[in-house]
Amino acid sequence: MTPLPNAICPLCGGANQCAPARVGTYEVDCWCRTAPVSAAALARIAPDRRGMACLCPRCA
């Protein structure tokens, strides 16, 4: 499986700093693997945008 090349946060439109999206593989470390992501933030993502791009650290 290859990550989608979406580098924009679906909530704020800023850079999401997603390393897998940037390099095209999940075989790299990313900030989101150790940072908590709130359920409230995930719930604010529009249904049609869920699973398409990572949140940025600020929105997570």
Image: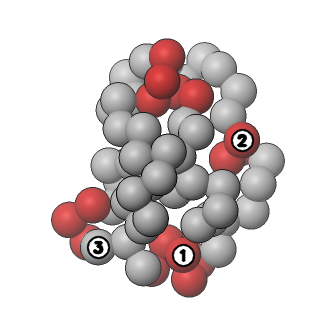
Q: Which mark is residue 41?
A: 1
Q: Which residue is farthest front? A: 14
Is residue 54 visible in the rendered structure shown here? Answer: no
- Image point 45% across, 29% down: which residue? 21
Q: Quadrant of the C terminus?
A: bottom right
Q: Position of residue 57 (x, y in %)?
A: 66, 55
Q: Position of residue 56 (x, y in %)?
A: 57, 54
Q: Position of residue 9 (x, y in %)?
A: 44, 54
**Residue kind at label 2, given as amino acid type:** Trp
Tags 3 and 2 in contact by the CB under 8 Å rule? no
* Scheme by which the image is coloured: secondary structure
* Residues packed near mark 2 inside 10 Å, few (<14), some (14 to 19) or many (20 plus): few
Q: Circle 2 sits in a helix, a strand or a loop, which is it? A: helix
Asked if residue 38 is positioned above or below residue 51 in the image, the reply reads below
**Residue kind at label 1, given as amino acid type:** Ala
Q: Is residue 15 left or right of residue 30?
A: left
User: Mark 2 — residue?
Assistant: 31
Q: Which mark is residue 46?
A: 3
* Residues packed near mark 1 inside 10 Å, few (<14), some (14 to 19) or many (20 plus): few
Q: Which mark is residue 50?
A: none
Asked if residue 24 is positioned above or below residue 11 in the image, the reply reads above
